[in-house]
Image: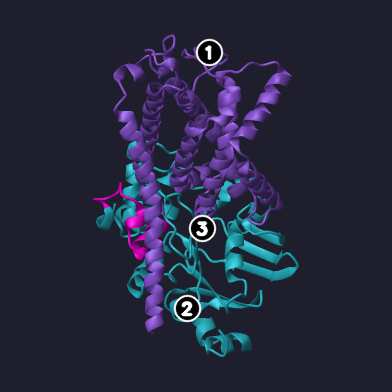
């Protein structure tokens, strides 16, 4: 009798937190929207990526594995290929003339570089983007968040309402805008616009978030808000961030990739790279010899 | 320091004078038309067809010309937009910004933009003779469409060129296709489309030379595309050419109607434009 009780108790104590965690995650991800890919939790991996634009080689033999549920900061001097690498992940680099890529970028089983049509759309949905400068779509605040859901086939009014409220809450914007959801998104402050862009990306339930210097156009206060958001969001998303500000990387990065002249010089946990850099170039960059 | 100050004053005065000249001309035209037209316009004139001997001073009206003009302008604007919006999308969304094809296409539209409407009319007329067609409403609509397409494309293109590329990336990054992204582009360039439509409506309704050869003229309202149609500018022309002062005054009544239509369309267009540009970034 007593042993039975103990068994049950012990089993519960092991299972309970897991169930809780699962339920919590489920709730946090989706108010009734089931976009999540069956392959969710897949790894994003770059292998021997060479990228050139015209005759100029921008990235050389990049190999990298993006750690899950962490903030990966890509750092390096201007023009070293950080943004190009970031744009390769969701193939937005395609819009640049004369791009040639070799090697592979895989998301689970899917080869991103060879994806086309529906596969590419799927990749872009699974890897969200927060642009450098906030870029709200020319529509209302509500429609900005609902846009992604609409193009992926969710049109139910109630469901969209729930999505919009959920993700505006997620980025801490709901209370600020709930009275004016029908107003133009351009009426928001720059910081609010950037959070709206983040909510818009989250609404299609990506697994990865790409942020290309997402705070560089913002004032310090808004910048701090967005940074805090990223730290909060990494619980459910893997975030890849290009940043120019070393201090920012120091504050929020879990994993750091240092690129110089199109090559990865050093990667590792933030603490290790920032405090015990292995490579001479990394040391010089961190100490401000070049920037 | 002092000369700089004087320079500034001179330039300011020149600018004010230019503005005054433009506003003065516009006001002068509107005044003349209203002054001469208002005194002789009657309800009968705008609501009835020309009776026998209307052009020598007998009774009747020019409803045929009003309806003909409205038919031609509405249909040609619709057709024009149907052709030019895809062209603008193709030039700005599908082609790269430094595309040679886009350069040649823009050059071609610039050339078409500059061709006088009488040339369009003559061209269409010779084509119609070759095909064995008679003057008809359809002919008028087609030639007016050809006439306004370059206006529509060039003025929409100017707005579409300033379209921020970031918006395209924002839409693509959510997994939108090019077709879905066009919806975003459309919203952004909507004020441009409204302006272009206004410009082309103004041009289409006021054009006499193009429709003279193709739509012909008729004292009745056309009931099919193959019948000839009257237009307001031609109606004004025929009445002004009459020797009787009374008939000439009626031309001003027709001009008044034409001006009023253009004014109403412009004001409505501005109102719509304002509504559409609400969300523009």
Mark 3 → mark 2, Cα distance in angstroms: 22 Å
How far across and how far down the image is residue A98, in percent?
A: 71, 60
| Callout 3 secondary element | helix
Chain that appears cyan: A
- Check the image and report above or below for B182 versus B258: below
Point 60% across, 23% down: residue: B214
Q: Is residue B271 left or right of residue B169?
A: left
How far across and how far down the image is residue A103, in percent?
A: 72, 62
Residue, disc 3: B166
Where does the magenta region start and end?
A: A178-198
Q: Residue furthest top?
A: B52
Q: Residue A245, labelled with which disc?
A: 2
- Check the image and report above or below for B45 versus B2: above
Mark 3 → mark 1, Cα distance in angstroms: 48 Å
How far across and how far down the image is residue A273, in percent?
A: 54, 82
Quadrant of the image containing the C terminus of chain A: bottom right
Point 66% across, 29% down: residue: B122
Pointer 3 local density, CA inside 10 Å: few below 14, some 14–19, many at least 20: some
The answer to if A182 sits in the magenta stretch is yes
The answer to if A167 sits in the magenta stretch is no
User: Mark 3 or mark 1, which is nearer to you?
Assistant: 1
User: Mark 1 or mark 2, which is nearer to you?
Assistant: 1
């Amino acid at each position: 009798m007593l042993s039975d009780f103990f068994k049950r108790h012990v089993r519960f104590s092991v299972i309970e937190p897991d169930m809780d965690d699962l339920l919590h995650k489920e709730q946090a991800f989706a108010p009734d929207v089931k976009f999540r890919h069956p392959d969710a939790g897949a790894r994003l991996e770059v292998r021997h990526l060479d990228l050139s634009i015209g005759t100029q080689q921008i990235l050389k033999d990049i190999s990298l594995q993006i750690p899950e549920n962490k903030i990966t900061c890509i750092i390096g001097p201007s023009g070293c290929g950080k943004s190009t690498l970031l744009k390769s992940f969701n193939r937005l680099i395609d819009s640049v003339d004369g791009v040639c890529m070799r090697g592979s970028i895989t998301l689970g089983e899917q080869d991103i570089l060879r994806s086309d049509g529906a596969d590419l759309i799927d990749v872009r949905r699974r890897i969200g983007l927060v642009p450098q400068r906030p870029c709200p779509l020319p529509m209302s605040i509500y429609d900005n968040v609902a846009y992604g859901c609409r193009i992926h086939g969710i049109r139910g009014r109630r469901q969209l309402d729930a999505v919009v409220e959920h993700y505006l809450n997620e980025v801490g914007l709901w209370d600020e805008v709930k009275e004016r959801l029908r107003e133009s998104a351009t009426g928001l402050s720059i910081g609010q616009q950037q959070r709206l862009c983040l909510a818009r990306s989250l609404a299609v339930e990506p697994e990865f978030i790409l942020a290309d210097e997402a705070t560089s156009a913002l004032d310090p206060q808004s910048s701090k808000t967005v940074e805090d958001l990223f730290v909060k969001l990494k619980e459910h998303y893997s975030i890849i961030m290009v940043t120019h500000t070393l201090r920012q990387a120091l504050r929020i990065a879990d994993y750091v990739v240092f690129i110089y002249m199109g090559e990865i010089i050093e990667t590792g946990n933030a603490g290790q790279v920032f405090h015990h850099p292995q490579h001479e170039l990394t040391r010089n960059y961190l100490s401000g010899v070049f920037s | 320091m002092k000369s700089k100050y004087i320079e500034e004053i001179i330039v300011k005065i020149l600018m004010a004078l230019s503005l005054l000249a433009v506003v003065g001309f516009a006001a002068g035209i509107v005044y003349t038309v209203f002054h001469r037209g208002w005194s002789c316009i009657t309800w009968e004139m705008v609501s009835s067809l020309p009776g026998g001997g209307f052009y020598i001073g007998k009774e009747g009206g020019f409803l045929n010309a009003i309806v003909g003009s409205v038919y031609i302008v509405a249909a040609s604007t619709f057709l024009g937009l149907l052709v030019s919006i895809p062209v603008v999308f193709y030039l700005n969304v599908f082609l790269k910004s430094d595309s040679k094809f886009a350069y040649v296409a823009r050059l071609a539209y610039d050339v078409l933009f500059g061709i006088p409407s009488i040339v369009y009319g003559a061209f269409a007329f010779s084509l119609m003779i070759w095909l064995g067609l008679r003057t008809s409403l359809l002919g008028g609509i087609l030639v007016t469409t050809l006439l306004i397409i370059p206006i529509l494309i060039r003025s929409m293109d100017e707005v579409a060129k300033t379209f921020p590329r970031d918006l395209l990336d924002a839409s693509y990054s959510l997994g939108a296709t090019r077709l879905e992204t066009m919806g975003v582009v459309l919203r952004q360039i909507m004020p441009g489309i409204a302006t272009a439509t206004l410009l082309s409506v103004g041009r289409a309704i006021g054009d006499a030379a193009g429709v003279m050869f193709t739509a012909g003229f008729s004292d009745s309202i056309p009931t099919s595309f193959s019948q000839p149609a009257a237009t307001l500018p031609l109606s004004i022309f025929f009445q002004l050419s009459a020797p009787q002062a009374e008939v000439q005054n009626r031309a001003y009544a027709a001009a008044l109607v034409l001006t009023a239509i253009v004014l109403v369309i412009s004001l409505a267009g501005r109102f719509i434009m304002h509504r559409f540009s609400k969300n523009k970034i």
